[in-house]
Image (cartoon, rainbow, N blue to C red):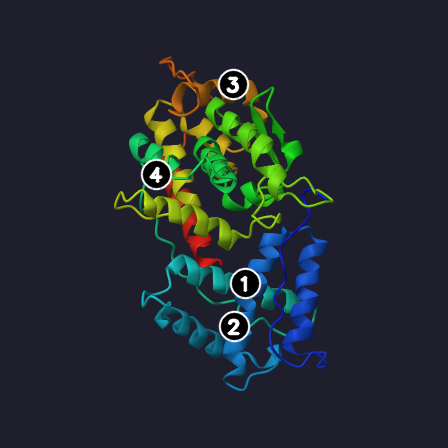
Amino acid sequence: MPGRDRHKTIIPIGDARDAVGFVALAGAFFESLRVKNYSGATVENRSRYLAEFVRWCHERGIVRPREITKPILERYQRYLYHRRKKNGEPMSFRNQHSHLVAVRAFFRWLTRQNFLLYNPASEIDLPRLEHRLPRAVLTVHESEQVLAQPNVGDALGLRDRAILETFYSTGMRRSELIHLSLYDLDQERSTLMIRQGKGKKDRMVPIGERALLWIAKYLREARPTVVLEPDDGTLFLTQTGEPFSTERLSQLVREYVDKADMGKRGSCHLFRHTMATLMLEGGADIRFIQAMLGHAELSTTEIYTRVSIRKLQEIHAATHPGALLKPTHTAAPEPNPQPNSPPPTPADLFSALAAEAETEDSDP
């Protein structure tokens, strides 16, 4: 069925028969998150971070949550600070923050459910998060270089061109593209419905004429060669007829970026940065770009209630260099000013994008 949850929960190591051990209590914690309608991605990420913490505890002979003290959690925090990734680089503060948030949420739940008398994580200070600009953004020319890399004479190359064009035109997240369904594409209205995006929110975004043409060509000539019956309606399929994993999609896009040989590195999120930057340079108000990206928690929130898809299409066509087959040079429409609502700044926008990129890089 379209839109099914493809996320998985990672169970920590330990004795599952121990009713007050990490395995049993973590399982109950994850179940409580699902009951509260947390997204599958949130449950999966928290389970991954908690499993790492439990593994660290087991290596030190700690097998039950009630054995954890504040000093032990402080030791774990220092461990994360000194930990090195496979390439020798330190773990980012944002990644450390994500690990500790998962652990803190777990112990807060244990205390509220009376499995613990007090919360040893209640006074743990989380790392301060830096606000950084995107590491790399493509110019219009560089974007076209990447888009030209797939061999469109081949079915898989045609699919890849459609994927790259979709990323470039819409700036959607990697997970959002993976979950696109045939029924989410409205070619007549030139829109895509992104269902259950971050925060489990749906949004409709415009998609450019060129991207639509490549998707239509992919649907006619490439998808029928890989689809398996029964067809679940997933828009973009691997060569084995299955939905993409996040790792495979990132690898695919990264290979084309590297092949373009521009001296810049990146993957799916690179196009998200690029779309936002090019629309901003084209004159789009930041609040319209927020609506495209699905940033609902920046200043001037709930823009979706004030911006129609038709207005958003006008902005997209006027400011995105790849939106129209024959670009026009019309001025971008202005948003309706909101009383007592300070406009967001480019720093707000790019800080949020950088935070997303670090979170994406920390996940498989």
Q: Are marks 1 and 2 in contact (CB under 8 Å)?
A: yes
Q: Secondary structure at mark 4?
A: helix
In the image, residue 280 above or below residue 195 = above
Q: What mark, if any, has residue 55 been given in the picture? A: none
Kind of residue at disc 4 = Ala
Kind of residue at disc 2 = Phe
In the image, residue 247 above or below residue 82 = above
* Residue position for label 3: 311
* Residue position for label 4: 347
Of the numbered discs 4 and 2, the one sitting upstream in the chain is 2
Q: Residue furthest left?
A: 263
Disc 1 to disc 4, how far (Cα)?
A: 27 Å
Q: Nearer the viewer, residue 215 or 347?
A: 215
Q: Position of residue 5 (x, y in %)?
A: 66, 50
Of the numbered discs 1 and 4, the one sitting upstream in the chain is 1
Q: Position of residue 62 (x, y in %)?
A: 56, 83
Q: Secondary structure at mark 2?
A: helix
Asked where in the image residue 92 lies, by quadrant, the reply is bottom left
Q: Is 116 left or right of 128, judged from the image as shown? A: right
Disc 4 to disc 2, how far (Cα)?
A: 33 Å
* Residue position for label 2: 53
* Residue position for label 1: 102
Name which residue lies at 45% across and 33% down.
165
